[in-house]
Structures are given as C-alpha cells and as structure tokens.
Amino acid sequence: MKQLITLFSTLTAVVFSVSSAEAVAVNTNTETKIRYCNKTEEKIFMSVAYQTSDPSQIMARGWWGIEAGACSELSFPIYGDKLYVHAQSSSQVYQWLGQNPLCVNTVDAYDFENAATRNCAAADLALRKFKEVSLADLISEAGTQLPTYQFTLDEAQRVASGIKFCNDTDDAVYISFAQSKLTDESITVNGWFKAAAGKCFEAARNPEAQNLHFFAQNTDTRLKWKGSRPLCTDDYDGFSYPNASTMACDLNNQKTQLFNSQILPASGDFEYHFQTQQAHKARSVLEICNSRDKDTVLALAWEDSDLPGQYMSKGWYVLAAGKCLSNMVVDSTEVLLHVEDDKRELLLPGTVEACVDDLHAFQFSKATQMACNGTNQMRAKFATQAIDAGDTRLTVPNR
C-alpha cells in the first residue's frame, strides 16, 4: 500500500544553534528552583553556573533552549546566594554577558565542575562572561511562586553584525539563504527559517561574506520571493546543503529554487523586507474533486515555471468518494494527473511519463529527466489537463 501524504505539509523551520544538544539532564535532587524567561522575539540558549559545596569550585552547565516568549523552570544545588547566567540568541548576534569569565563548550551540552579554573584551550571550548546575580534580588512574576530571571533585549550586547529578514506580510514567511565570497564555487544553503507575520528573522553575518543569496515563500507557497540563481533546497524539511550550487538536487523532496543574490555592504548589518507586492504569485490554485463513489489515489505533475522543461511530480493523495483535494498550488498553465482506483487501475489515460515512488509519499523536481531507477521508483503515465489562472476546479471522472 502506498504511504499517503496529507493535503498540505507545513514547512519546518529551523534555527541556528550554539549547541548540538539543547539541554543537559536536570538533576531532580536539587535545592533551588528558578524560572528563566525569554522576553525577546527569538530563541535563546542559556548556561548557568553556581558555587558547589566546595567553595573553590564553580559548576557551569548548558545549554538550555528557551523559545521566544517562553519560560523554563530549572533546579540546581546552589550553595550561597550567587547565581551566574550567560545566554546567546539563536541568531548569534546577541549575548547576555557579565564580568565573570567561565569555560563553556560552544558546540555541545556540557557540565563543568571547575569552570573558573579549568584549561579552556581545547577545540570547541571558550571563555564566556557570566553575569553574577543575587538570589535575594530575584522576585516572582505575577501568578507564579518561583523566583524569576528575565532575559530582555535591552540587557543584551550585540556581538556580531546581522542579516535581518523582515516579513511585512500578514502570513508567515519561510526563508532559505546563503552567504558566500565572490570567488566561491560551492555555496552552503541553510533553511527553512521562519519570520512570522510582522516579525523579523535575524542571523549573524559572516564577516568574510560578500554575497547574500536568499529565497522565501509563504506558508502555502502561493507567494515566492526569488531571483535568478539556481540553488538546491529541501522543499519540506529544514536542511543545510554545503554544495547547493553543484549538487544534482533530484532526491525525494529536493527542489531547485531561484535565489535572489545581492552584494553585501563592506561591513555592518543588512536588512531585507518581504512585501506582498514584490512577491511572485503562483498562477493557479487547484481543487481536485472525486465524483466517483469509491476512493481514488492521485499523483500530480507540472512543468516548473522557473526551469522550463523540468517537471515536478508529487503524490500520493487519497481522494475519498465525493470529496475534494483543495489548495494545491500549481504555477503552470497545465497540470498532469495520474489517478488510480482502489484496484490500482488507471482512470485517466495519458502519454506523459514521469517518475514516482510506487510505495511512499514523494516529490521529485526532475520527474521526467531523472533516471528513476531507485528503490520503489517507476515511471507512471500522466494525463494532461489545461488549467485556468486563479482558483480552478478539476473533477476525476466517474468511469
């Protein structure tokens, strides 16, 4: 049986992280519980430090991820009245610093008993300045019983230049981007990063980068902000492709998109605003209805409007008897349909062959060109249907 996909799969946003593990295990046999609240608009990663039963030792631990606007409650066996905190924004542009240098692992979760005195010269280790906090100065927020520490942007220090993408539309925008030198042949693309409606997403600028490449689309992909530079993306999941400019980009869910390329200023920040009037709008949005009294299974294909001669195929979708599949965004003048009944008999005869995965949900961006010799892959025949611009309804015939 084919593994079916739902009507629409929301893009998964990812963020830059200062840690490959968001948290170390919390000791449940603790004495002091504190509530840590992120009052900024982006995720932060926090480390804490405190004096142990040995007055000469400072224990430092991290990293805990706290989402924008959220709080985390953590407990530690704190001796004395002092707590030390350090945090970094997910963009790596902001840090919450103090005057006390302690050793941290900048890549992985860590638990250092001698953070103030240990040798911090190894790879992935660095001294970070922690802020000293008196527990007696922490007060509880309204509605809570726990002492609370707040991370606010006005208390953070800007430690790097940033690249900021701002969303001026009324829907979320998902962004893929790359920074490169003018001489780079291989370009690393990362995505997808979410900028909520009316909000910005910010990332640290690579000080050596001279070019910025970016592509964005809204939640249902009707709107796209693009350019002319073809680079590979994963059309469904978060990704990082070191060779996005040279890879084949023909695996399931991979999609070549045309990126906007801009020259970065010699130094400082860069800011770009996504606006509806500047976006490319998809030509058609389909509603495909099943007029039969039995379920059908559907795959679609269409020519990529950005890359003529290149066809995307996508499936499988179940159309229940008498039901419709809505909001299928197709940026083309025609759509190709492959429809099977419950006995796997083809309902629409067609002549165009495109690659499908015969068992699993799939999306191939080079469906008519790829070798199609992978596991479970096969060529299926599709019937051509002209479609109108705008909202369009197609009906699977009752035959």
Image: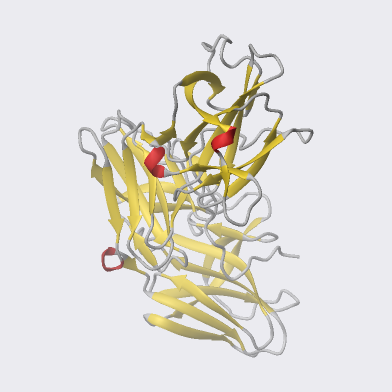
Q: Position of residue 191 (x, y in %)?
A: 46, 47
Q: Nearer the viewer, residue 345 or 10?
A: 10
Dividing the image into 4 quarters, which one contains the C terminus? bottom right
Q: Position of residue 245 (x, y in %)?
A: 39, 40
Q: Is residue 320 above or below residue 254?
A: below
Residue that lies at the very extreme toward the front in this rendered image: 136
Q: Is residue 227 in view from this perspective? A: no
Q: Residue at x 37, y 42 (%)?
A: 154
Q: Nearer the viewer, residue 93 or 184?
A: 93
Q: Is residue 196 above or below residue 164?
A: below
Q: Is residue 255 above or below residue 333?
A: above
Q: Residue at x 53, y 48 (%)?
A: 238
Q: Residue at x 57, y 10 (%)?
A: 117
Apparent side of residue 22 relative to residue 343 in the rendered image (left or right): left
Q: Is residue 183 above or below residue 315?
A: above
Residue that lies at the very extreme toward the left in this rendered image: 266
Q: Position of residue 349 (x, y in %)?
A: 58, 78
Q: Is residue 164 in view from this perspective? A: yes
